[in-house]
Amino acid sequence: GTACLLLGTLLIWLLQRWMSAGILSTAVFFLGLALVLPQITIWFARAVRPMLSRLCRVEGFLAADNTAKFPQRTALTVTALGGALAMMVASATLIEGFRAASQRWLDYALPFDLAVSSTDFARTGYGGDVFPAAIQDEVRSQPCVDRCYGVRASFCDVDGHDVMVVAVEMAGFASAQGRRDHAPSRARFEEPAILQGLLGGEGLCVSENFAHLYETRVGDTVSIATRDGPR
């Protein structure tokens, strides 16, 4: 049991380099708790039996004595408790990890404070509806708006695959990124080769998921189906 707990601690350290170790560390920790906690409980019950006898009289003595004399029943109860606690901690950690990662991505990728969208997020997470061009001009004319740029997202055929393509008015986007003094994503737009290619419409950025699925690397060419033909 002690060896399993030590191995679980080592696997947590490996999480920095191997994310799959998280599932394995949870299983190893649970196994370690199942093996160690029953014996610890029995030792603890025997140690506190005199104190419980003095404080709680007969009831305290019987509780501690019953725990020490029936290790199988004690082991089952303690293991169930340890498993429940382990699952609660794992679930809380997973949820907090999602929250922190999502917030980190939002801070990294989005340079704006407010987005105006035609998509009803109560019905779908992605939509192809678009605003008239006059809406953007109206938003830009508001006294509280410092800068405004348009974004269009739609599913398109890219090299024979149905892929979401996000088109951004790069001049406004790059300008908004440049105003972020300490944003980590700003470094991407300080590289002339990347910024000039995006501003000139000669380059694009792909997600890590796209690159992994379709084996795309820096410098490769992709074909996007448009109304005017492949581009």
Image: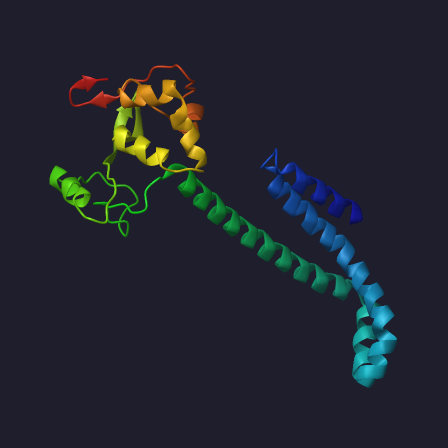
Q: Nearer the viewer, residue 174 or 70?
A: 174
* Vertical placement of residue 59 versus 219, above or below: below
Q: Position of residue 99 (x, y in %)?
A: 47, 49
Left or right, 17 with respect to 10, comes to: left
Q: How many marks are shown on the rendered structure?
A: 0
* Vertical placement of residue 193 versus 53, above or below: above
Whether residue 94 appears in this view of the structure is yes
Image quarter for residue 86? Answer: bottom right
Q: Nearer the viewer, residue 163 or 78?
A: 163
Whether residue 210 appears in this view of the structure is no
- Give the residue at x 65% y 57%: 83
Q: Position of residue 101 (x, y in %)?
A: 48, 43
* Vertical placement of residue 137 versus 123, above or below: above
Q: Position of residue 75 (x, y in %)?
A: 75, 61
* Vertical placement of residue 148 versus 92, above or below: above
Quarter containing the C terminus: top left
Left or right, 163 with respect to 144, comes to: right
Q: Nearer the viewer, residue 131 or 226?
A: 131
Image quarter for residue 38? Answer: bottom right
- Give the residue at x 42% y 24%: 211
Q: Nearer the viewer, residue 168 or 56?
A: 168
